[in-house]
Every structure is written in C-alpha cells, then in structure tokens.
Amino acid sequence: EPEVTQTPSHQVTQMGQEVILRCVPISNHLYFYWYRQILGQKVEFLVSFYNNEISEKSEIFDDQFSVERPDGSNFTLKIRSTKLEDSAMYFCASSEATRDRVFFGPGTRLTVL
Amino acid sequence: EDQVTQSPEALRLQEGESSSLNCSYTVSGLRGLFWYRQDPGKGPEFLFTLYSAGEEKEKERLKATLTKKESFLHITAPKPEDSATYLCAVPNQAGTALIFGKGTTLSVSS
C-alpha cells in the first residue's frame, strides 16, 4: 500500500541554523500538510498546500517557515533560523481530493541544540 | 477552548477486557471525525472517518461510533498489540486542517 515517506528520520541542528525536512506524499494525492508534535503534547497543524500554493497556515507557521513542492513528487518544509522551541516531531501528511482520509508519514525528529 | 476532548487520558486493560474511549467535539457543522492510532515515536496511522450520527465502522477489534456530540472507539477483547495512543481529530471550518485531541494512551497487559 502506498505510504508517505519522510527524510531524514532524525535531524540534529544548532540554534539559528536552517533545516529542510523532506517528504514524498502518496503519488495521486492532491492535498499536502505539515504537522508537528512536541514531546508529550498533541499533534498541531502547521500548514496545508493545494494546487501549488498554501491553502491555510496556523499561527505557528510564521515567517521562519516555508514550504515548497519543487517537483512532482517532493514536498519540503524549511525552517530558516531554528529555535530551541522548534524541537519536535514533524509529520508530513497527504490526502486525496475528497480529503476523507489523511495519511501521515513516519515523521522527522528535529532536535535543536 | 479545546474543540476536541478525549477521555480518559490513560487506560489500562487486561487482555480480553473490553472498553471504550471517548472523543467529544464542539465544532459546528461537522465535516467528519477521524480516528488514528499512534505508536511511540511514529506517525499517526489512519483508522476511520465517520460523517454522520449513527454511523459505525469496524476494523478487527475496533469499532467506532458517532453521535451528534461525541464519538466512541470500542475495543473488544483487546490484545497487547492494541497498546498505543488513540487520537481523535476533526476538520476545521474550512476543511483544510485537522484539529487533534490529546489522545488516550491504552495499555493492554497479558
């Protein structure tokens, strides 16, 4: 069964550095998302992306964050200048046009030192 | 104000001891209620989407039901491998994002 994949599985970075988290959504899906989960907390929405543009973003998704779909398969999340509080699991997700099932990837654990 | 509330926060069961998890929501014009399973350090795994009161869906030992204000995830004769955190989520008004509850952590011992 098709799956959402994410790389890397774990990223360690220094505060102030830029990181790019990568995702390959399920191939026939049209909606793409990033969520994050700080350890011990609930899953939080960051941004949704449809038709090559952001369709919604949360308060968390400030100017330090950006998303891109550079080609027909990849979907990336960039954090320009990481902060300690950006340490979390970042999940990519995708859904079909009907959006009646949203599938999540395995996550990237980001650790900011 | 939380729009999705799950209870209990944690539940310990003996193998074979059936129980139910609760998810209550306050969003108006429900566009679906999603259940996920999450294992430690992993991404949420899709289980069910329910759309209307009275709807039921089943998968192995799990059955999800929906009323106008809440959903239940019934676990029948659970096994240790059912141990996980079960998450409930509803779409926002625009349908562009899922709002998650904090989850119920289920532990099943043999």
Image (cartoon, helix red, strand yellow):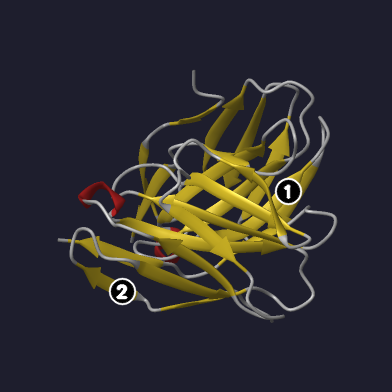
Q: Pick whichever, B12 or B3, lies toward us.
A: B3
Q: Amino acid at mark 1?
A: Thr
For residue A62, side relative to residue A18 (left or right): right
For residue A46, side relative to residue B53 (left or right): left
For residue B31, side relative to residue A16 (left or right): right
The residue that appears at 72% across and 80% down in the rendered structure is A72
Quarter of the image for residue B50 reads top right
Q: Nearer the viewer, mark 2 or mark 1?
A: 2
Q: Disc 1: which chain? A: B
Quarter of the image for residue A92 reads bottom right
Rendered position, B65 above or below A4: above
The residue that appears at 54% across and 74% down in the rendered structure is A23
**CA neighbours of label 2 inside 10 A, class few (<14), some (14 to 19), many (20+):** some
Report if residue B43 is visible in the image.
no
Q: Is disc 2 placed on a helix, strand or loop?
A: strand
Give percent across and percent down for residue A75.
59, 71
Where is mark 1, residue-wise? B49
Rendered position, B109 above or below B3: below
Q: Amino acid at mark 2?
A: His
Q: Which mark is residue A10?
A: 2
Q: Which mark is residue B60?
A: none
C-alpha distance separating marks 2 and 1: 30 Å
The residue that appears at 35% across and 61% down in the rendered structure is B40
Q: Is disc 1 placed on a helix, strand or loop?
A: strand
Report if residue B103 is visible in the image.
yes
